[in-house]
Image (cartoon, rainbow, N blue to C red):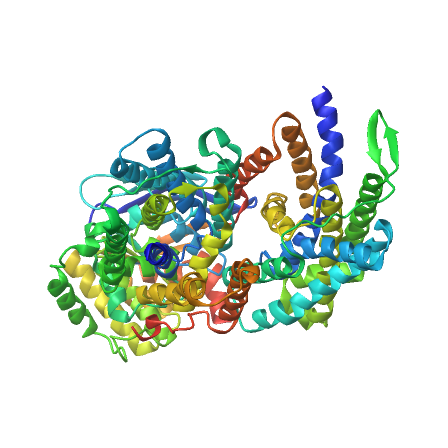
Amino acid sequence: MAYLYYSLTLVAIYIGLTLLLHLQFGRLGIVNFGVVGFWGLGMYAHGIMVALWGVPWVLAVVIAALLVGAFALALGALILRLDGQAVLVGTLAFATIVLHLVTTEKWLTNGVVGLGTIEYPFDWGSSTEPVFLGLVVAAIAVLYAYAVRLDGSFYGRLLAAIRDNEPLAHGLGKPTFRHKLVFFSVTCAGMGFLGALSASLFQFLTSNMIAPGVTFTAWIALALGGKGRPLGAILGVVATVGLFDVFIETFAPIPPDYALLVPNIKLMMYGAFLVAIMMYRPLGLLGNSQEHR
Amino acid sequence: MWLVTDSVFIGLIQAAPLMLATMGFTLIYYLNGFINVAYAENITFGAYFASIFQVFLGLGFFASILPAVLFAGVFSVLTFLLVFRPAAARGVGPTEMIILSVGLSFFFRYGATLLFGNNPYFLENANPQYWTIFGQGITDTQVVALSLVAVVTIGLLLFIYRTRWGEMMRALANNRDLAMASGIVPTKVSVLIWFIAGAAGGLAGIFFGVFALVTPYMGWNMILVIIMLSIVGGIGSVRGALIASLLAGILTAGITLVSQPLYADIVLLILFIAVLRFRWKRA
Amino acid sequence: MSQARLSITDLKKSFGGRTVVSVDRLEIGRHRIEGLIGPNGAGKTTLMGLITRKLTADAGRLIYRPGDTDIDLGSMSMDMVARAGLVKTNQVIQDFESLSIRDSLRLSLALPEWERFWTVFARRRNDERIEAEIDEILTHFPFANPGGKALSAGEKKLLDIIRCLLLRPRVLLMDEPTAGLPDDLTRAVMTLVEQKADENDMSVFIIEHDLDLIWDYCAHVHFLAEGQLLCDGSPKEVRDHPVVVEKYMGIVDA
């Protein structure tokens, strides 16, 4: 039972990351390939504060999110004026820097040995895990409501305008760069917030958690579900993380010898999916509501 | 002072494969105008091809270089013909094309993990010779690496700036429609360029592998630095890419001598993000 | 209209060593509608770009006077200039591909305080007034389907102009408004522009190759060639000016 709650919480966190990616890429056209960097920075910031420095849990979550937001602001100020290719490479570089720093600064992060233990914010016996899951789901619900509310709102229209034709929006008196910077920083802070929540879920942090596979999973889920609508993020994550990390790992009878191969097969298939989607269905396998809006 | 001379010397040797890979990457970037992240696996596969020729066919290290390089070139051409050309024909834009290439990179990388396992392969020169030049120890592998890189580099520069094919490539990169109107067949030129780029990447992979280990992640670990050097060197400028990789090699060697290699990567990547701001055309 | 809305002095811009714009003195806004004509490559579009701060001048001063106070445009960004009431329509067709015509107009009418990150959850109170304003403006123009997207090049061009008008500019710059528009639509656009100019005390400055439009609607015309203003005056004065005849009319007639 505990494992099921763990898996479901993980799915919820991936839905959150994919929703944030939907906001960044689907709504505003920001190609963030450094998801794991923002998420991982939040996770480690929270873990270090709670496990090493004894900062109260809630305060540590807030500080972690703000810290990630501040880094995103600095990075965004450098790269958000540039085109999609540059933003992709810049964010990827950021995530790589975070990964390297977690590996090199062993005095702080304990590297591959691991940092822990990060406890849940409360201990209610056997209901601790389900309540924590409820907490994460509540946060995701707020995020989902936000994404849905963007449709038909002045702000959502502004984001679409910037994505479609930034110079034109700029000429209509919209401070486009400032809007991009604010939106990017806040959504990245959201990734840091989810990272902080993940720290409690994992309890023990190691540097190999900051793997490009996290970014990639969020992207594949977004690509599968369709970048243009919030529901796509949920469907995409269920079809990827839900299928591979929950369903197959929990229920499929895989001999232990082959169990280690599953993650590799998974990432290989994700890769093939992404190629196929980009080539044949750039709006997502499950269609896109934007065309009919 | 020893730090400077050692950095330059080690940097030169380390930069040799980096220069090759950056040149190859830059060629594709220049010709097709998109960042091909899957070039990472071209490097990786070059090293694996050489290991296979060595381990399974019993070829010596030097003898395995040529067939491995040819295979890497063919591999590169295949990715172009089977993936990138159809994608371009379907109108996939530059940003979507990198996302696609990231997908392809994951496909190859984890495919390699399944095929070859997570354990590293060792690519090695069985009977290394040691020489001393200017008071620095050097192996014959390193000498071969340096000389091959020098030969390939000069050959490439001559090819791009002095031959008809190079001229056709530059014409295609600058104005595709005009080039096609004047009778240049893009597919022929592209196949040749992707072959050369793939072969260069494969050769780079062999030397990365022999100086360190052959793993499925070796190319991926290098590709960001390669992308960065290509951009810093001036997008599509092979000469600029060469100078940038040489400087990066020396900087990396210097930082590695006083601390650890990851710091070199961190410094390079931070520099890169700062440089992007000025080097890149505005959106 | 004794005072100019926009005063330009010693404005210079060069690209790669070639001087494209070198305007000693230009005052706009003493007349309701003014025109700028000149041969291709005279620097007309560059001049517009400098005024709206899309481009940064190498030297010179741009003083904008929407009311009684002077505003130096030299330190402002393009969006600030637009919000201050100095707006330009686009020469090349521009559109937001995922926004419907109505959404595009709503975007124009949105105030900055409605476009904040957290306003998404706020109740929307101003919708009715905005919808009414959009309905009013749409009565002037025959869009095939205002709830859908702009389809033809003509519709997109028209939409571009309406988006700008809805910003209630004090100075409206129009870069070749008729290019791509059918004749009857051009007249409808110009009638509306004249009407809005009167209603909202707006000055209009038009670049146009369609000289009939310039002679018909402009009270004052400036002539630009090789980056320099060579003469200005009433349409009749400019039409008959020897420099204009020599450098421009001969080419147009040929």
Residue at (66, 27) in percent of width and height: B257
Residue found at x 32% / y 48%: A190
Q: Position of residue B188 (x, y in %)?
A: 73, 70
Residue C69 drawn at (x, y percent): 20, 39
Q: Is residue C13 left or right of residue B84?
A: left
Q: Quadrant of residue C24?
A: top left
Q: Is residue B283 left or right of residue B61?
A: left
Q: Is residue B107 visible?
A: yes
Query: Residue C207: where, in percent of width, then height?
Result: 37, 60
Answer whether residue C176 is visible to the viewer in this image.
Answer: no
Q: Please tell me whether residue A281 is drawn above or below residue A11 in the rendered image.
A: below
Rendered image quadrant of residue C23: top left
Q: Residue at x 29, y 58 (%)?
A: A158
Please tell me in which quadrant of the rendered image residue C122 appears.
Answer: bottom left
Left or right? Give the position of A7 relative to A110: left
- Looking at this view, is B283 or A120 the one in front? A120
Determine whether, in the image, residue C53 is placed left or right of residue C16.
left
Q: Nearer the viewer, residue C37 or A54?
A: A54
**Residue in the foreground of this view, choosing between C145 and C252:** C145
Residue C168 in the image, given as x and y percentages of width and height: 21, 57
Is the N terminus of chain A in the top left, top right, bottom left or bottom right quadrant?
Answer: bottom left
